[in-house]
Image (spheres, rainbow, N blue to C red):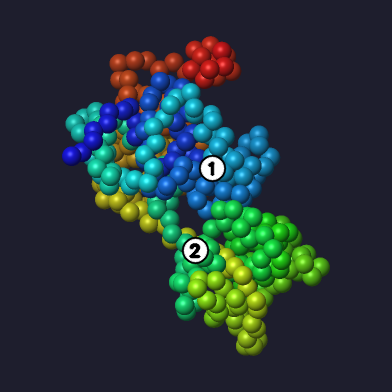
Amino acid sequence: MSETIKTDVVIIGAGPVGLFAVFELGLLDIKAHLVDILDKVGGQCAELYPEKPIYDIPGIPQISGQGLVEALMEQIKPFGPTFHIGEMVTMVEKDGEAAFRVGTDAGKVFECKAVVIAAGGGSFQPKRPPINGIEPYEEKSVHYAVRKMDHFRDKKILIVGGGDSALDWTLNLQPIAKRLTLVHRRDEFRGAPDSVNKMRALVASGDMDLKIGQVTDLEGADGQLHAASIKEKDGSTNRIEVDAMLPFFGLTMKLGPVAEWGLDLENNLIPVDTAAFETSVPGLFAIGDINTYPGKLKLILSGFHEGALMAQKAYHYVYPEKKLVFQYTTSSTNLQKKLGVA
């Protein structure tokens, strides 16, 4: 039997943008429930790079992915959002002119006035590198994400890839590794130039190794890597000892059930207007990496901006008879009471 939950807004996705949407909605007395397929809040920040530093959050020179999630959770405490973790939204449908029904794979059904899709790129899965026999090592000594840096302390680490993730983790793990080797198929990198320069400086000083080639074979037992073979650019094969391997070949994003909700789609993204980030369905919004519009930048701070404008429009669906009076948190006693700082 379905469990029916009534609320003002359902937010699909509990990453940073979904969490900040709770804050913007809460200031307007709009209650929210959040549903996320992951087993924790925080989206990609918590799942893929909890300890990776983020440098472009306004007013915060540096914060880790997990640190940002924790700060957002603290910020939205006054609004008491309800989380439904480890569940996937499978159904979003109109229920008359002014309401939605949202269903999950756990049998829950929500009745709400507006829906906000803040699902990043949808469900994401790391791309598996084309290495024979890699499967037995996955999640044991082959890892597609770094959840605890200390897990790699004093280990012989092999990082494979040439983008920002590979370079960032090369620079972050090199100081604690016993020895670190970076492998890329060519001597050109897609990452930030500053990261490339820092990596090359470590190679020049002898503090890490760089191999231009591809990993062809793995050696080990019971899921634990012992060595890897690298076919280098000149055709020679080099065998190195390895305790852990981190392949960064990018992510495969899958929209999943979102593609079946009757929305207009553009290259697996959801087009929205830039006044309120509303989709082609009135009352259904999309914010963060999952939306598209002219000039779109896939930045967390862009998603925060989108969430603020979304909330202003969502208010009219939740409180159609009320007039919205814009207020500043710095000067409004009413808002400060909601935040518990008055």
Q: Is residue 220 visible?
A: yes
Residue in the picture at 49% in, 63% down: 139
The answer to which image quadrant residue 256 occupies is bottom left
- Mark 2 is surrounded, within 10 Å at the Cα level, by few (under 14), some (14 to 19) or many (20 or more) other residues, namely few
The answer to which image quadrant residue 84 occupies is top left
Labels 2 and 1: the sequence-earlier one: 2
Check disc 2 and give the amino acid type: Glu
Q: Nearer the viewer, residue 253 or 125?
A: 125
2 or 1: mark nearer the eye: 2
Image quadrant where one finds the N terminus: top left
Image quadrant where one finds the C terminus: top right
The answer to which image quadrant residue 30 occupies is top left
Q: Nearer the viewer, residue 219 or 317?
A: 219
Q: Of helix, strand and loop, which one carries label 2?
A: loop
- Mark 1 is surrounded, within 10 Å at the Cα level, by few (under 14), some (14 to 19) or many (20 or more) other residues, namely some
- Image coords of residue 155 (percent x, y): 66, 66
Check disc 1 and give the amino acid type: Ile
Residue bearing the label numbered 2: 139
Q: Is residue 291 visible?
A: no
- Image coords of residue 88 (percent x, y): 33, 47
Q: Of helix, strand and loop, which one carries label 1?
A: helix
Vertical placement of 328 versus 32: above or below? above
**Which residue, as the protein is rendered here, is positioned at the far right?**
205
Residue in the picture at 34% in, 15% down: 322
- Image coords of residue 328 (percent x, y): 54, 19
- Disc 2 to disc 1, how far (Cα)? 28 Å
Residue in the picture at 45% in, 38% down: 18
Numbered badge on residue 300: 1
- Image coords of residue 245 (percent x, y): 58, 68
